Image: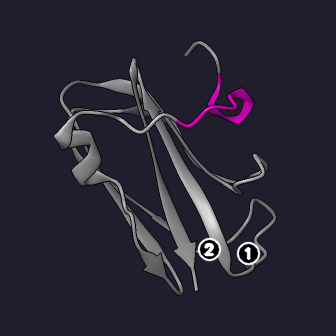
Amino acid sequence: MGRRLSQSRICVIAESPRAEAKLPGRAFQDSTAVRFPMPSSSAVEMIARKPSGLTVRSLVQMNLPAGYHEVRWHARDDSGNLVPAGPYWILYRAGSDYRCRLVVKM
C-alpha cells in the first residue's frame, strides 16, 4: 500500500466534502465510530495517533469490499490499555484516498 500511515508525519485534511463528512470530529468518552464509504474494494489502513505522532492503536489493516463501513475505537491502545483523555488523530488510507480527523477523548 505504499508508505504506511504509521510512518507518515503529515496529516492532510481531505478537501472533498464527502471525505470531510465521513470521519468523526467530536469529543467522546468511551468510544467513537468512524464511518466511511468505499466506492470499490481496496486495501484500507486506519490508525489512532497522538498529536506527537505516536501511534496508539491500529484500527484496520485489511482489504475491504465496496460499500459503507464502520469502525469503532474503544479508546484503547494496541496493548488493550485505556488511553488518557486528550486529542487523537484518526488517520485513514484506502488506495490514494487519505483522510484524517481530530477526535478528543474526554
Kind of element beneath mark 1? loop
Q: Position of residue 17 (x, y in %)?
A: 18, 41
Real-space Cα separation, disc 1 to disc 2, in angstroms: 6 Å
Name the residue located 56 percent from the left edge and 37 percent from the top edge: 11
Q: Is residue 68 left or right of residue 2?
A: left
Q: Quadrant of residue 37?
A: top left
Q: Residues within 10 Å of mark 2 (few under 14, many from 20)?
A: many
Amino acid bearing label 1 = Val
Q: Quadrant of the C terminus?
A: bottom right
Q: Position of residue 23 (x, y in %)?
A: 34, 54
**Magenta stretch mostly in which secondary structure?**
loop
Q: Exactly how many numbered labels are in the figure?
A: 2
Q: Is residue 10 magenta?
A: yes
Task: Decide which of 75, 23 is in the foreground and name it.
Answer: 23
Q: Mark 1 or 2 closer to N-term?
A: 2
Amino acid bearing label 2 = Ala
Name the residue located 73 percent from the left edge and 75 percent from the top edge: 83
Q: Position of residue 33 (x, y in %)?
A: 38, 67
Mark yes or no: residue 67 visible. no
Task: Decide which of 53, 60 is in the foreground and name it.
Answer: 53
Task: Decide which of 63, 71 is in the foreground and name it.
Answer: 71
Above or below — where is 33 with respect to 82?
Answer: above
Q: What segment carries the magenta color?
A: 4-11
Tag 1 near tag 2, CB within 8 Å:
yes
Q: Position of residue 85 (x, y in %)?
A: 68, 81
The residue indicated by pointer 2 is 75
